[in-house]
Amino acid sequence: MAMSKMAPISMFFLKLLLIGLSAPQFIAGDDNHRFVYSGFADASLALDGTASVMPSGLLELTNGTAMSMGHAFYPAPLRLRHSPNGMIQSFSASFVFGIISIYYDLSSQGLTMLVAQSKDFTKAMPVQYLGLVNGSNNGNTTNHIFAVELDTWQNPEFGDINNNHIGININGLASVKSHPAGFFHDQNGTFKNLTLSSQEAMQVWVDYDREKTQIDVTMAPLDMATKPQQPTVSARYNLSVVLTDVAYIGFSSSTGRIDARHYVLGWSFAVNSPAPAFNLTMLPKLPRHHPKGRQSWVLEVVLPVATAVILLSLGAVAFILVRRHFRYSEVRDDWEVEFGPHRFLYKDLYHATGGFEDKNLLGVGGFGRVYKGVLPRSRLKIAVKRVSHDSKQGMKEFIAEIVSIGRLQNRNLVPLLGYCRRKGELLLVYEYMPNGSLDKCLHGKEDNTVLSWAQRFQIIKGIASGLLYLHEEWEKVVVHRDIKASNVLLDDEMNGRLGDFGLARLYDHGIDPQTTHVVGTIGYLAPELARSGNATPPTDVFSFGMFVLEVICGQRPVNHQNTQDSQLMLVDWVIDNVQKESFCDAVDARLKGRFDVGEAYLTIKIGLLCSHPFANARPSMRQVMQYLDGEIEPPELSSEALVVMQNEGFEPYIISYPVSTTSIGTMSHISEGR
Ligand SMILES: *[C@@H]1O[C@H](CO)[C@@H](O)[C@H](O)[C@H]1NC(C)=O
Ligand SMILES: CC(=O)N[C@H]1CO[C@H](CO)[C@@H](O)[C@@H]1O
């Protein structure tokens, strides 16, 4: 019987307990305005917009639809004022909320818990208006709204302090007071930030004290057992002038462009007493993740951009490396090992010449361009000649030749320092000659740099000595093949140095030269070379003779000063003067008669002897050297010989000279009007 008595009582309490879990639990007191929802499963809230109560009892204010809003109100009106002109009662509310955004670290917009004169918020706007007001009524005193906002977006137009704040609002969105979301520790008073959209449930307490007309808003993580003593944000505001006698309490929430869901897990309210506590174990759970949850807007937005930037950077680096590879790429064959010490890195030459910049261009020669440069490490001044070559054929012999010649130590040869090979290109590295080419000195525009007779004589002797060395004094016979003023360079003491061995071929003593191309420059080419194509020491001697006359007379071997069809041959003109016994007239007029007559006659004789159309009538370079040194008298120029030279004439030969066998450079000299 004790049991039968007990059972109904237990049932009563059980019912009470069950009701208490979801339905508002009314407790006797002032106007019955006191409720606790630990979940909303059986609550009859007034909902609109996107708001709905989920089966778990979770109140979902927004459901992820962009730019939407939802409201949920306690269905019954509150009577907060006892007499028409009385004060609004003190009240306390508490709620547990959670925001699940598609991103962990970015959300929009937020939610409010509000007290208003009506449940009708159809005229309110979503997004930044939080479903609370609209653009035209924001801030109006006729709104009669008190709200606490949890705002995840910074709207400067409303004076928002950041994108994660809690604020006390009257009639609109500009908060009376606001503070970054978080709480003050009870122990040391330090502030701990909370992220509204952290996907964690958090509790908020809203307390209005009518005596002090003070609003305190406090927040804390749900797992913190007690309400912090210090409110997160407080404001002095007399709600008696704001709220109507009869008012409704509820929530509003809105979304912006970001897919975010705003949830309320529990809610309690009381007039003139603290908000009742929740049954924490009964609170519904927040969804663990956003249904379409993505890690982070940082990952989603920044990562692709960063990835693109990284890929672009990698691409750029790869491009630079590839370009570098091609820019500095070289051709290197096994047989070149022995020439290693003479091999230059293209990279070094590239940097030495400033990337073969035009301002470092010294000149355009027969076979390529010549650039001035300074070697990076040694600071040695160099001249780099870029010669284009297409075939690998003969390259080994060619390299062997130039390297061998590079080893020639003669003060009348331009020192060849080494070479470099690239695809379709050979680079020859010479020591830099500060005073440039003799050609420029002789035929340069500026008349202030007229070479003196002594300098000219010294240059002639120097080139003769250099050529003698190539022909006879070295272990192999070297035929230069392209002796001319532009291939004679002047060192810092104005010594003539024979340059451009690009055309030279080596062959052993006594073996007939096997040549396939006629190379050289018109005007300096021996007649038999044009016929046979065989370059020999005598063909060099012929060129040397022309060169000597050029230096003495200051005129080019073939003069184009007149009209095209009356080319003036320098040799003819000199012979004319010799025959008229006025050889002094042949000497460069710019010297104004300041020259050694004996030396002038000697060199004119040598020039003419060397330019003899018959190869076997020319002296050897050793004989030329002996004439110049005064060891031997050169033979007199017989008038018969002079007549033969004139009769053999050069004009027919020049005209019949096959264009196809001349070098490009040679032709360019002609077209340049030399
Ligand atoms: C969100 O709520 C609105 C209004 O009730 C509804 O039309 C829409 O389908 C809902 N969207 C989702 C994703 O539940
Ligand atoms: C005529 C001429 O240019 N002479 C120069 C040759 O080079 C030396 C050294 O660079 C100069 O001092 C001369 O003036």
Image: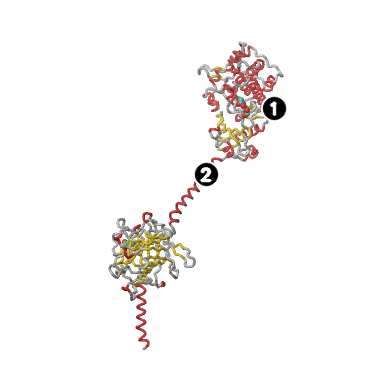
Q: Tell me the residue that label 2 is attached to.
A: 320
Tell me the quadrant of ligand 2: top right
Q: Is residue 232 shown left or right of residue 116?
A: right
Residue wearing tag 1? 473
Answer left or right for 654 relative to 50: right
Instruction: State the residue in front, 453 or 563.
Output: 453
Q: Secondary structure at mark 2?
A: helix
Mark closer to the chain start, 2 or 1: 2
Give the image quarter of residue 160. Answer: bottom left
Outermost bottom residue:
1
**Looking at the picture, does residue 268 appear above or below residue 565?**
below
User: Which residue type does callout 1 highlight?
Assistant: Glu
Residue 226 place in picture, x, y as percent: 44, 70
Give the vertical position of 576 relative to 221 (above or below): above
Tell me what residue is drawn at x 58 percent, y 28 percent.
517
Residue 183's place in the image compared with 463, above or below, is below
